[in-house]
């Protein structure tokens, strides 16, 4: 029964693609094709939810085809529900959004292919299946960027993406090839540890490095980050799908191939450093972008940096938790990218806030700092067993969010009402967050990392972000601030010929 | 010296049309600078001013353009073609020969290559966008010193530029005027004007916005822009202007075409004199003129049909039960037609701001909006006074509290440290909301409305009597009554403004009332209703001879053009005596609205289905819908005259209708007001739609699906580039079909011809528009006189095709 459901999830996804492609080739109405594809993806979502319930009850399930296999373990179940749910929603959105667009058919085929490849990716249980699904997802993404092939900006986006993906995926295939040869054919992801051990140190490190490069490129991390900001010449649903379903594949690779990668402690350190660097760099770039989608792009880059950093620290459950919540968040923001004018009008009609000054402001800030931090400490002590240092350092970010949110509330309006609602709200959210995160980690129960980067490394990006925040607020003239602002503004558009001062 | 340079800049920028930001979208003619020249003359070869010849020839073969219309258009444009030409044994009218030329051998058009932006343009776009960013997460340092000064300080330290460039920027003058002076010092004074114009030509979207901003906000101007552009350009040692590829001169094919026509006309027996005669005719109408002639013929067919539909019946004598005054917007035409199916309902058309120009802010609101036509400057601020002050205080406190939480959420997302954990928490909620919003938009909207109560929803009175003196109020009321011809007010007069409710639509302001500055017109209706109901004002009006009966009550309402519902506003101010009538009116409008939605669903893309009315109305809340309504797509004409001209005629929501009665306007001042204001607004809208349809990539905004908003300033297409002007493709087309038929505005006026002529002579703008054929004008003195067309040389009688006779009758 469980195997049937597993097979159904994957088969239905690929059938949706096939049917969509066939209907488009037959010049069927693209509107109806879009509705059929969205409906089928929705049905597939229901199947995935059913499979989630089943695996919760009966445990993981594997389906083998010769040496290759696919599986339904907690990770694949969670992620396939996420991918199929988001894909169904975004395709339903696109049925109306791309109404009349002559490329609507192309979008439907590309979106369904991307969904099917990603479902196969998360359900993959053996090395070859994973690698093929990975490459297929990358190719589908590039096809998605070609939705409006006449636009020069689309060309630029495709060129940049294709170059980086080709390089990184070539490396991935080389690394996977070595693993296949060493394992004598396609082997399950669970046996990776022994295969890697049989490879010997330098070869094992090379393979691990190639895998890491592939993950970094897909998640748009430094130094392979130069493709994501140039992908906005495709319709909004493509961006939503991309930011919600494709860029987070890096973490999935790092978690699945953890037996190979996490053996090398300093490789994990590199991952943390690169993730942290992207986090800081993308946060700075986001602060200076004036356009709404540009901000979302750099926000995604920073969030992926956070996620990759968590992977490097060995906090796999936290990384996947972040991945899922971020996918839901970012796709909503992209789909709603046109709300700016309505929001402006609504804000204009709202009463102005009365400024909170002096003693009340100081009191508000004090409460805003003490309450979330102490609430977090108490929740962590009560609910988390055992307490991992990696998770603790990441909680610094949670504390920062709690403090900033409560401070913004109380310095906006310091009354009994806001105090009560604010404090109870923050404490409830913190408690719920910790409880949810713990339940999630327990349910996911990922294979722990063999070695991981030292947890204190998180302090570096945290401190850098804090400095950045102070720089944005400073009212005195500061050359450092001017330099950072100018760099953040123009380096994202850095063109080699611009640097040489030549016309393009 | 800087004043002279600024004068040069202003002169170079003279033809640039300022473009309004997204939050108060005003339709403008993107080629307004060329209105002083004949339509289509000296046009940029990259700008399409008509559809292609292939399209016109297809229309010809479809029967949309009869050959007689083509010949008439030829004669109208080139009078010498009225003669006949002997060709061997036959004699043909010259117009027929020229028409044959147009139909049989259409010209091929060269495709235009989109210009690639230079590194300079790209760099400039980044700096301008960062400077003008309305809600920055990190405010640009030194922004208060002006664009050039801020840029210079930041670029001098910009590590992305090579060191020599940075040094050159640091050495540049500190002041924008000085920098511009230095940059143009190498340009000869006689060439300066053209040089500056060439510098203002790239990035037309940003330049147009800067020109608007220089007048309305003042934090940037074109001098600063040019200073940055030229300094950056010399620093980058780049070409400052993209070289213009020379358009090859078209090959002269007159003799060839003449030969072919001669052969086809004489059936092979064409001697050289025949060919020469034909060639002489063709030389009068060179290929460069073909498109304009096609366009003229195309429009003439519509115009003749329109004028033929107009009625000549006497007005009914009994007093109507309810009069509904709507905006001149073409969408109102549909509602007026459906409302007038009921006995006792009379409708009038008047500019949507009802003659009350105000700057309005809701009760206790932090911002205000300009509710008046774009060309006027507001001089009176008006706000609301709630009737129940305790409830108002409670609502304001609740709104402030909600505002604090909203601000907190936005800060959590926007600050540097918090977005990571914020995404982890907020993601789950936003995922659920997205699912609800995409699958059940109306439920989501109902939820949103239930959770947000705004101070603006409280019953309140406007403070018009505080802002305007009694004399001003009387004068506004008197002008309104005279201009729309409201002499026999019904017991209930509903002043209906209009607005459009859509979701996730950056162009929502383009669908609102243009006469109210791109805002919903309900506020102006409320202000006007209060004005007319004021007993002091009524007494003064009676003194001026404009009597409003004591049993007349004015009520304000707003027409939502997506849902086609008319909501009565300020119910608290309706006296007991008229409540029953108001309720009856509401039932009427519900039925009329439903019928109108059914009519609209026939042309609205994707709206043909069962439960069409419900589905179309749901589009207001659907965030995925790119076609919430068609707006003013299809607008083609403006009729200024009494409703009897158009009562009962189905104008397919394509016509601006303004009420006017000659007999109530002895000195012609009302007509002058109408012709110099609402007519110009209609012309702007018409040309905005016209050029956005024909040039979606350059004068229009392209497809909405890749739009990327810069705050509420405007949109970029993709991740960088110029600000887009005009309307998006989804406002004018569906897929590869056009929803808007590009036709220049046909104005029809029923008023004394010499009065019209006087008004036109006295007004430069109108003279330009009409003499240069940007719009056309057809008029008649009254119902007993024939229709005449305005031409540069006087009034000429028109051809009228009456629906009953269906034959050509020169009137």
Image (cartoon, grey):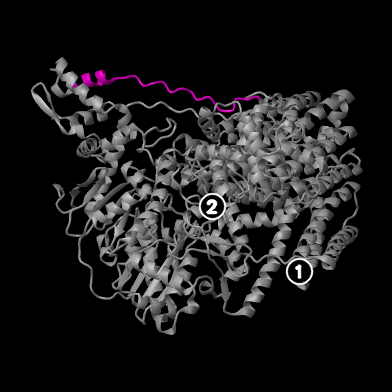
Residue at numbered disc 2? B505
Q: Residue B186 is drawn in which quadrant?
A: top right
Q: Is residue B231 above or below residue A480?
A: above
In the displayed structure, does residue A290 sit left or right of residue B777? right
In the displayed structure, does residue B739 sit left or right of residue B167? left
Q: CA distance from mark 1 to mark 2?
A: 33 Å
Q: Residue at 42% x, 65% y: name it.
A: B354
Q: Is residue B575 above or below residue A187?
A: below
Q: Is residue B58 visible?
A: no
Residue B279 placement (x, y as % from top left) = 22, 22
Residue A217 placement (x, y as % from top left) = 73, 33
Q: Is residue B232 above or below residue B434?
A: above
Image mark for residue A468? none
Residue reaching furthest to the front: B1
Element assignment for label 1 = helix
Residue B310 placement (x, y as % from top left) = 24, 56
B252 is within the stretch colored magenta: yes
């Amino acid at each position: 029964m469980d195997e049937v459901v597993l097979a159904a999830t994957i088969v239905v996804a690929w059938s949706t693609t096939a049917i969509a492609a066939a209907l488009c080739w037959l010049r069927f109405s693209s509107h109806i094709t879009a509705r059929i594809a969205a409906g089928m993806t929705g049905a597939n979502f229901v199947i995935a939810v059913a499979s989630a319930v089943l695996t919760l009850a009966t445990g993981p399930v594997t389906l083998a085809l010769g040496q290759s296999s696919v599986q339904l373990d907690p990770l694949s179940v969670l992620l396939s529900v996420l991918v199929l749910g988001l894909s169904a929603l975004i395709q339903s959105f696109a049925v109306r959004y791309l109404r009349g667009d002559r490329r609507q058919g192309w979008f439907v085929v590309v979106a369904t292919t991307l969904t099917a490849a990603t479902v196969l990716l998360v359900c993959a249980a053996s090395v070859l299946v994973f690698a093929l699904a990975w490459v297929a997802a990358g190719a589908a993404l590039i096809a998605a960027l070609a939705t409006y092939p006449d636009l020069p900006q689309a060309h630029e986006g495709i060129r940049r993406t294709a170059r980086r993906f080709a390089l990184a995926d070539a490396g991935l295939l080389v690394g996977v090839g070595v693993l296949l040869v060493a394992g004598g054919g396609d082997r399950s992801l669970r046996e990776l540890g022994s295969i890697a051990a049989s490879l010997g140190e330098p070869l094992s490190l090379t393979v691990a490095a190639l895998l890491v490069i592939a993950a970094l490129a897909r998640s748009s991390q430094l130094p392979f980050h130069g493709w994501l900001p140039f992908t906005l010449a495709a319709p909004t649903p493509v961006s939503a799908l991309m930011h919600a379903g494709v860029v987070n594949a890096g973490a999935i690779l790092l978690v699945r191939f953890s037996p190979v990668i996490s053996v090398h402690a300093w490789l994990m350190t590199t991952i943390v450093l690169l993730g942290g660097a992207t986090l800081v760099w993308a946060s700075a770039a986001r602060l200076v972008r004036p356009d709404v989608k540009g901000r979302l792009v750099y926000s995604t880059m920073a969030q992926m940096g956070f996620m990759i950093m968590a992977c490097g620290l060995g906090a796999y459950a936290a990384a996947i938790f972040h991945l899922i919540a971020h996918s839901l968040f970012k796709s909503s923001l992209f789909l709603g990218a046109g709300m700016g004018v309505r929001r402006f009008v609504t804000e204009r009609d709202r009463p102005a806030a009365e400024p909170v000054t002096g003693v009340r402001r100081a009191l508000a800030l004090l409460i805003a700092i003490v309450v979330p931090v102490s609430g977090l400490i108490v929740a962590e002590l009560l609910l988390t067993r055992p307490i991992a240092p990696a998770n603790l350092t990441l909680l610094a970010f949670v504390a920062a969010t709690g403090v900033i949110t409560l401070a913004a509330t109380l310095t906006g309006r310091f009354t009994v009402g806001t105090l009560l609602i604010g404090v109870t709200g923050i404490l409830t959210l913190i408690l719920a967050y910790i409880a949810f995160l713990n339940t999630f980690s327990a349910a996911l129960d990922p294979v722990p990392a063999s070695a991981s980067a030292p947890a204190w490394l998180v302090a570096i990006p945290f401190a850098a972000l804090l400095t950045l925040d102070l720089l944005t607020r400073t009212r005195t003239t500061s050359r450092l601030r001017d330099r950072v602002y100018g760099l953040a503004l123009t380096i994202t558009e850095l063109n080699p010929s611009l640097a040489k001062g030549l016309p393009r | 010296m800087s004043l002279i340079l600024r004068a040069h800049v202003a002169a170079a920028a003279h033809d640039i049309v300022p473009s309004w930001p997204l939050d108060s979208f005003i339709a403008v003619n993107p080629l307004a600078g060329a209105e002083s020249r004949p339509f289509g003359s000296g046009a940029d070869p990259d700008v399409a001013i008509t559809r292609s010849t292939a399209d016109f020839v297809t229309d010809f073969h479809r029967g949309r353009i009869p050959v007689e219309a083509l010949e008439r258009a030829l004669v109208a444009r080139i009078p010498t073609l009225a003669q006949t030409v002997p060709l061997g044994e036959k004699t043909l009218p010259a117009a027929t020969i020229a028409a044959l030329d147009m139909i049989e051998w259409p010209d091929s058009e060269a495709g235009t290559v989109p210009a690639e932006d230079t590194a300079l343009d790209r760099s400039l776009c980044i700096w301008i966008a960062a400077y003008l960013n309305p809600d920055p997460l990190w405010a640009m340092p030194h922004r208060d010193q002006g664009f050039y000064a801020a840029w210079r300080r930041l670029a001098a330290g910009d590590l992305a530029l090579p060191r020599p460039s940075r040094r050159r920027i640091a050495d540049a003058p500190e002041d924008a005027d000085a920098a511009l002076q230095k940059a143009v010092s190498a340009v000869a004074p006689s060439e300066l004007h053209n040089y500056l114009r060439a510098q203002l030509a790239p990035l037309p979207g940003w330049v147009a916005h800067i020109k608007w901003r220089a007048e309305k906000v003042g934090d940037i101007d074109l001098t600063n822009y040019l200073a940055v552009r030229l300094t950056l350009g010399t620093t980058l040692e780049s070409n400052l202007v993209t070289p213009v590829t020379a358009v090859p001169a078209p090959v002269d094919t007159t003799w060839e075409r003449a030969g072919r026509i001669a052969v086809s006309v004489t059936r092979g027996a064409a001697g050289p004199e025949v060919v020469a005669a034909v060639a002489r005719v063709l030389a009068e109408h060179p290929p460069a003129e073909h498109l304009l002639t096609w366009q003229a013929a195309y429009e003439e067919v519509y115009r003749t049909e329109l004028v033929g539909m107009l009625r000549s019946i006497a007005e009914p004598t009994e007093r109507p039960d309810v009069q509904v005054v709507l905006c001149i917007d073409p969408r109102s035409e549909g509602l007026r037609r459906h409302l007038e199916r009921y006995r006792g309902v009379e409708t009038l058309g008047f500019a949507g701001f009802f003659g009350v120009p105000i700057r309005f802010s809701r009760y206790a609101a932090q911002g205000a909006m300009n509710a008046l036509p774009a060309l006027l400057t507001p001089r009176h601020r008006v706000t609301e006074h709630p009737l129940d002050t305790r409830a108002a205080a409670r609502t304001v406190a609740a709104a402030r509290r909600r505002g604090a939480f909203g601000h907190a959420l936005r800060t959590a997302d926007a600050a540097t440290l918090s977005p990571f954990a914020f995404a982890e928490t907020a993601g789950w909620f936003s995922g659920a909301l997205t699912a609800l919003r995409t699958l059940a938009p109306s439920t989501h909207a109902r939820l949103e409305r239930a959770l947000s109560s705004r101070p603006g929803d409280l019953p309140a009175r406007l403070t018009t009597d505080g802002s305007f003196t009694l004399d001003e109020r009387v004068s506004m009321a008197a002008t309104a009554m005279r201009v729309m011809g409201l002499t026999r007010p019904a017991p209930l007069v509903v002043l209906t403004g209009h607005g459009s409710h859509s979701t996730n639509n950056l162009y929502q302001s383009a669908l609102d009332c243009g006469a109210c500055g791109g805002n919903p017109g309900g506020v102006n209706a409320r202000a006007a209703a209060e004005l007319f109901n004021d007993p002091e004002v009524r007494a003064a009006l009676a003194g001026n001879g404009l009597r409003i009966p004591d049993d007349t009550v004015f009520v304000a309402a707003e027409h939502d053009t997506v849902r086609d519902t008319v909501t009565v506003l300020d119910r608290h101010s309706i006296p007991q005596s008229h409540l029953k009538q108001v309720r009856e009116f509401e039932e009427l409008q519900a039925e009329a609205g439903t019928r109108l939605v059914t009519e609209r669903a026939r042309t609205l893309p994707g709206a043909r289905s069962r439960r069409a009315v419900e589905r179309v109305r749901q589009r207001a809340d659907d965030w995925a819908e790119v076609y919430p309504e068609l707006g003013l797509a299809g607008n083609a004409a403006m009729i200024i005259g009494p409703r009897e001209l158009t009562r009962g005629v189905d104008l397919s929501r394509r016509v601006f209708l303004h009420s006017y009665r000659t007999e109530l306007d002895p000195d012609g001042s009302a007509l002058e007001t109408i012709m110099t204001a609402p007519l110009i607004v209609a012309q702007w809208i018409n040309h905005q739609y016209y050029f956005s349809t024909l040039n979606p990539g350059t004068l229009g905004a392209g497809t909405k699906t890749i739009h990327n908003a810069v705050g509420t300033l405007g949109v970029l297409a993709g991740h960088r580039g110029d600000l887009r002007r005009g309307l998006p493709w989804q406002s004018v087309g569906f897929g590869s079909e056009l929803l808007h038929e590009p036709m220049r505005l046909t104005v029809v006026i029923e008023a004394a011809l010499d009065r019209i002529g006087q008004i036109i002579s006295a007004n430069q703008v109108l003279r330009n528009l009409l003499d240069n054929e940007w719009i056309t004008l057809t008029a008649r003195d009254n119902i007993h006189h024939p229709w005449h067309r305005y031409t540069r040389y006087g009034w000429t009688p028109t051809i009228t095709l009456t629906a009953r006779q269906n034959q050509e009758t020169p009137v």
